[in-house]
Image (spheres, helix red, strand yellow):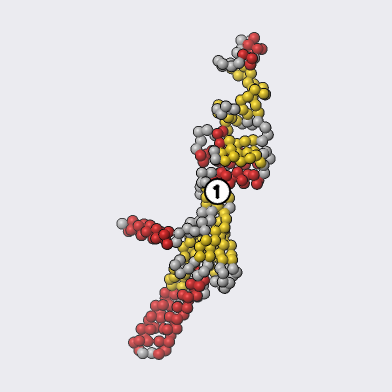
Amino acid sequence: MIGRFRKRVRKNLDQWVEKRLPQQNDITLNQSRIFIVPTRQGLVLLIIAVLVLLLAINFESALNYALAFWLMAMLWMAVHLTYRNLSGLTLTAQSGTLVEVGDVSELTLALSSTQARSRGVLECIHPVWGAIAVDLHEHEQVVTIPVPAEQRGPVMPPRFRIESRYPFGLIVAWSYVSINVKGWAYPKAVRQDRQAVSASGDEDESTLNDHFYKEGSEDFHGLRTYQPGDPIRRLHWPGFSRDQLLVKSFTDYQATDETIDWEQFPGLSTDSRLAAIAWYCQKFVEQGRPFGVVLPNAEIPVGKGEDHLMRVRRQLAEFGYD
């Protein structure tokens, strides 16, 4: 019963925060976005100030009045100074890194302010990465947030908390921030057998190993058993003389430049095909061989090297998220 009540309260609170503080590319913190409460030390000091004030009223002690008002004034000043640390601060989305699924993408955002003043140490807090301290001693500071890439596609930071307790630690001012900065995760490479695609578009039954070829008529490939419909001119006459009905099989070998085609992996799911393409791309780069990639929505020209591999991986990561 209590657990369900907590979940309901948490859900309603998350919906309220999402509506009040929506996701944006640029976020400027102001009085509508900043929340302020006393810390444990500040709360203890406030209780002491109230008790001293009650003693002053009871005993009509001027010294107690002065002490109580001085403590309250210090708390009020702490509220003002701590609020100034976040007020006017702008968070701007920058970029994210391209990583393999299972790795950690580094997302960068800039903290900037038009007013150059000491804001003390700010903290970006979330259970995923803990607390990242930021010392904004200039107009702008770049912050790097590590976010695990759990699945293929965009990698975005969850809503996190940015807070300040400077200068006295008696008051904490914070805001919940959801910023639209993203990295990308490409699929983890998994080996799958490719199948040749004939010139007519039909898939060959055999898998491809060392030599990727298409059925053709240029190069002799071997002998196979005669099947009805095979041309008579391809009969292997020496075998016919030994009562073996064989025909010659010819192939058209591809050029050195490989093309990794989506259709070469029939029967696999989308993510499995992308993982297989990633494996062949990585293999060809290691071998120093140029290659191109054909996807249902894009065709990547033939290239080679690490830069070409990164372009292909970016396409694989963004596939289906256009």
Residue extending farthest left: 1
Relative to 212, say whether 241 is above or below: above
Count the numbered circles shown: 1
Residue 216 image point, x, y percent = 63, 24
Relative to 155, say whether 205 is above or below: above
Q: Residue at x 45, y 83 (%)?
A: 70
Tell me if residue 41 can be seen. no
Secondary element at tag 1: strand
Side of 76 where 105 appears, left or right: right
Nearer to us in this view, 254 or 43: 254
Mark 1: amino acid: Ala
Picture quadrant of residue 187 = top right
Q: Quadrant of the N terminus?
A: bottom left
Residue 233 image point, x, y percent = 64, 14
Q: Residue at x 67, y 39 (%)?
A: 290
Relative to 320, say whether 196 is above or below: above
Q: Which residue is mark 1?
A: 185
Q: Residue at x 58, y 62 (%)?
A: 142
Task: Assess disc 1: are there few (<14), some (14-19) or many (≥20) residues with their C-alpha within 10 Å of its C-alpha.
Answer: many
Q: Residue at x 65, y 12 (%)?
A: 237
